[in-house]
Image (cartoon, rainbow, N blue to C red):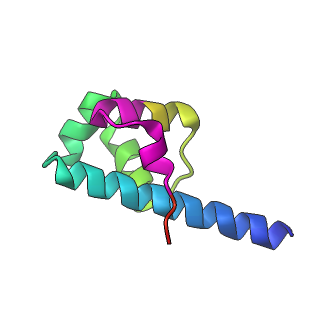
Amino acid sequence: SDVCSSDLGMELHQAVAGNIHRIRKSQRLSMDRAAELAGISVSMWGQVERGSVNPTLAVLGKIAAGLHVPLELLIENRE
């Protein structure tokens, strides 16, 4: 069951990365501007958007606030 839950976690943060990227692009924001609006560093934003880090809820909350979307939208994991 460990393998299953870590796969799900991996899948989820890839989904989160894709959602953030898609929303940022739809708002025509540069990564620099989006990070500034969210109050996080550009490097952190880049890592989250690439899916190379597993962001904390605090960071996801800042990103959601910066993009003016509900947090649920970022963590949606549709097939």
Instruction: Please give the name of the residue rendered at 24% of the width and 39% of the height, measured from the top-left corner.
Output: 34
Along the line of sight, which residue is nearer the eye, 41 or 14? 14
Does 68 lie within the magenta span?
Answer: yes
19 over 58 or under it: above or below: below
Q: Is residue 10 left or right of residue 23?
A: right
Along the line of sight, which residue is nearer the eye, 34 or 76? 76
Instruction: Please give the name of the residue rendered at 49% of the width and 54% of the height, measured from the top-left corner.
Output: 76
Q: Position of residue 64 (x, y in %)?
A: 38, 36
Q: Position of residue 47 (x, y in %)?
A: 42, 53
Image quadrant in which you'd find residue 22: bottom left
Q: Answer yes or no: is residue 40 visible.
A: no
Q: Answer yes or no: is residue 42 visible.
A: yes
Instruction: Please give the name of the residue rendered at 65% of the width and 60% of the height, measured from the top-left corner.
Output: 9
43 over 52 or under it: above or below: above
Q: Position of residue 41 (x, y in %)?
A: 35, 36
Please give the range of residues in magenta: 62-76
2 over 13 or under it: above or below: below
User: In which quadrant of the rendered image does the N terminus lie?
Assistant: bottom right
Does 57 lie within the magenta span?
Answer: no
58 over 34 or under it: above or below: above
Along the line of sight, which residue is nearer the eye, 9 or 31? 9
Instruction: Please give the name of the residue rendered at 72% of the width and 65% of the height, measured from the top-left corner.
Output: 6
Q: Is residue 38 left or right of residue 62?
A: left
Image quadrant in which you'd find residue 49: bottom left
